[in-house]
């Protein structure tokens, strides 16, 4: 393998296979972050969630929980929430079908209440720390010292 081929292979191997520990760290960080903002009653961009109607607010207060949209669904959604690693990906899901359908309905019904950050949230101050964390994890992976193995070939002309 030539030096050029070794460099190309190293870049492909490094970029195309983020170490499992990095994905695990990123998944845990996002999972914690998602529930932190939810327990504060804020959207992924840091804005407040819509105020509850009086009847629902009173029902939550009587149960001893915070009177705002928290997506916790009596604890079932939070307890069954997990992340899963794929090849260079992280996905989030619920291991409880009822929690999944409840959360999917509320996330996608179009009323502006979201649990998960999307691209437009990335410019918000709420998402800055998590994006910086991911950037640091990936930069550390790409900047680790590595040894390349290549052969030098001498070609003589004439």
Image (cartoon, grey):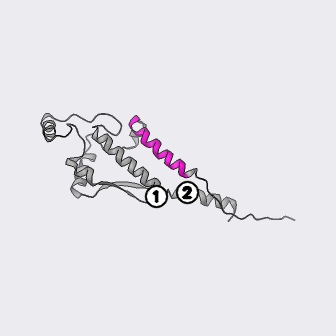
Task: Give the SS element for disc 1.
Answer: helix
Q: Position of residue 73 (x, y in %)?
A: 21, 47
Residue at (67% x, 65% y) in the render: 1
Q: Position of residue 39 (x, y in %)?
A: 28, 41
Question: Could you tell me which secondary element the residue under label 2 belongs to?
Answer: helix
Asked if residue 139 is among those painted magenta in the image, a careful observer would answer yes
When asked about the image quadrant of residue 151, the answer is bottom right
Around disc 1, counting alpha carbons within 10 Å, would you say few (fewer than 14), some (14 to 19), or many (20 or more)?
some
Is residue 156 rendered magenta in the image?
A: no
Regarding residue 113, the answer to whether it shows in the image is no
The picture places residue 149, in percent across and down from the top left corner, at: 66, 63
Measured along the vertical axis of the image, is residue 121 above or below residue 84?
Answer: above
- Viewer-proximal residue among 105 and 98: 98
User: Which corner quadrant of the image does residue 86 belong to?
Assistant: bottom left
Q: Is residue 108 left or right of residue 45?
A: left
From the image, tell me which residue sits under label 1.
Answer: 20
Image position of 5 (left or right of 61):
right
* Viewer-side label of 1, 2: 1
């Amino acid at each position: 393998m030539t030096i050029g081929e070794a460099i190309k292979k190293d870049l492909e191997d490094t970029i195309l296979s983020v170490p499992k520990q990095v994905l695990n760290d990123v998944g845990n960080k996002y999972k914690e972050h998602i529930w932190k903002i939810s327990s504060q009653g804020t959207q992924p961009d840091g804005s407040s969630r819509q105020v509850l109607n009086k009847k629902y607010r009173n029902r939550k207060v009587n149960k001893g929980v915070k009177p705002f949209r928290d997506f916790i669904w009596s604890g079932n959604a939070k307890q069954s929430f997990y992340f899963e690693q794929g090849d260079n990906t992280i996905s989030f899901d619920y291991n409880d079908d009822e929690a999944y359908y409840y959360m999917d309905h509320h996330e996608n019904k179009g009323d502006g209440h979201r649990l998960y950050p999307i691209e437009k949230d990335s410019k918000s101050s709420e998402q800055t720390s998590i994006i910086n964390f991911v950037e640091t994890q990936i930069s550390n992976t790409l900047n680790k010292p590595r040894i390349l193995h290549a052969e030098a070939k001498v070609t003589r002309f004439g």
